[in-house]
Image (cartoon, grey):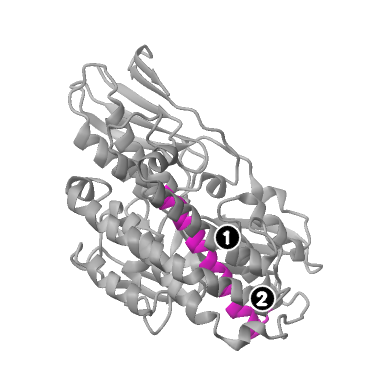
Amino acid sequence: MARRVVIDPVTRIEGHAKISIFLDDAGNVADAKFHVVEFRGFEKFCEGRPLGEMPGITPRICGICPVSHHLASAKACDAILAVRIPPTAAKLRRLMNLGQIVQSHALSFFHLSSPDFLLGWETPPASRNVFGLAARNPDLARAGIRLRQFGQEVIEILGGRKIHPAWAVPGGVREPLTEEGRARIKAWLPEALASTQAAIQLFRDVLQKHERETQVFGNFPSLFMGLANDDGLWEHYDGHFRFVDASGNVIADHVEVSRYREVIGEAVESDSYLKSPFYKPMGYPDGLYRVGPLARLNVCRRMGTPLADAELERFRRHGRGAVNSSFLYHYARLIEILGAVERIGQMVEDADLLGSHLRADAGINNLEGVGASEAPRGTLLHHYHVSEEGLIRGVNLIIATGQNNLAMNRTVAQIARHYIQATTGEIPEPMLNRVEAGIRCYDPCLSCSTHADGRLALEFELVAADGRIIAHAAR
């Protein structure tokens, strides 16, 4: 008799989702699905709004990565105005995006994911969280909080607030960096660098003890996509699209952001509000690709800063060509934090950041525009259509979590097949946590991906083919 295990909702992620694990007659895993079950429809809300409001409206999609939407929106507006923003404005936007990467990655690693592999997969859920981590290792928990605070401080110094800044505008930004702000950032740098290096050393030790997770948690060949530039440096704000395969070979390059529809298709499944983008030349679902920290490190040749470059070399020893294990998303996040902190240290010495030429003025010169930037979770696209008066006629948002949807489904199935054998009807909690942890590797942001709100609780059900619930567990 075929049965189904339901994990509803998945915990320690941003938003509300569930996982269904389908068992065959022998009790072995036949398939698994990651369902996003919340919906709000932010794209529709924007229709009829003036173009200039979009960089202030779209950050409200999410409280975790508002800066990502803020910058991608501003870049889409730049394209509609057909302007090249002043160099000072471009550098300032880059600086804010680095702060966003630091704060979001710190939240993901220290607060959401590390309790699993630092406290143990079998630790009871009541203590397998950031509070349990603080009780076990208060110095580490504090370092994680302070590191995230540093990233938020960069955002606040530039944008006037930590969350939902209204600072980037069509054509540039509102305010430059001040001398006082530069001094505040510089004062944080030694602590941020030390905390990041300590976390990287800690995760190196984790990897020695978690070889099985490295092999099982989303370890499969796929494509990887990210923004890239011609010099091969790690890119987080500008550039063109590049796709590489599981061996690290470039299969598409120099794809302009405005031409994204030539390479990215969007499929819709009936059991989830989350779209499933795919690499169009390979079709759906064969065109599965991954985005985010793991992809960016596979797409670039070097980080461009000394400490991060050295760590990238260690990271690449975990793959042949590309690094394919999704468990190493955690390692990639730490390397990106390291590179971001180093780059912030370099950038704050640039006198251009204090300049006064911050905005290019223009009217509506194009009736559509695409903006792309690297959000912490992966490449983010905003595509706007406007009237000649500059009113929004249509919006399409392609979110990193959606682009990882096919990969997350494959990851869930791979983990479930490894840990779930012929079942007696019981639901072992450590097994379910490992399945959830496979999703947490991607650090999904479901409010971004469906532009919605959600609340978290947790129920598990083992459901027979005739609908009978034969086992139930709740947190």
Q: Is residue 350 left or right of residue 306?
A: right
What amino acid is found at the position of numbered circle 1 in the picture? Gln
Task: Classify 321 as above or below 417.
Answer: below
CA gap, disc 2 and disc 1: 16 Å
Q: Residue at x 31, y 32 (%)?
A: 123
Graded by Cα atoms within 10 Å as few (under 14), some (14 to 19) or many (20 or more), the crowding at tag 2 reads: few
- Where on the picture, by quarter, is residue 378? bottom left
Above or below, 461 relative to 136: above
- Binning the other alpha carbons within 10 Å of mark 1 as few (below 14), some (14 to 19) or many (20 upward) gives many
Task: Name the residue nearer the viewer: 248 or 261.
Answer: 248
Residue 467, given in percent of the width and then of the height, sits at: 38, 14
Q: Which mark's residue is nearer the viewer, 2 or 1?
A: 2
Mark 2 highlights which residue?
180
Q: Is residue 102 shown in magenta?
A: yes
Q: Which quarter of the image is occupied by the C terminus?
A: top left
User: Dominant secondary structure of the magenta stretch?
Assistant: helix
Judged from the image, the secondary structure of the residue bearing numbered disc 2 is helix
Verify whether residue 101 appears in magenta.
yes
Which amino acid does the dot numbered 2 rest on? Glu
- At which x and y percent is residue 141? 42, 49
- Magenta-colored span: 82-110
Q: Nearer the viewer, residue 230 or 176?
A: 176
For disc 1, the marked residue is 152
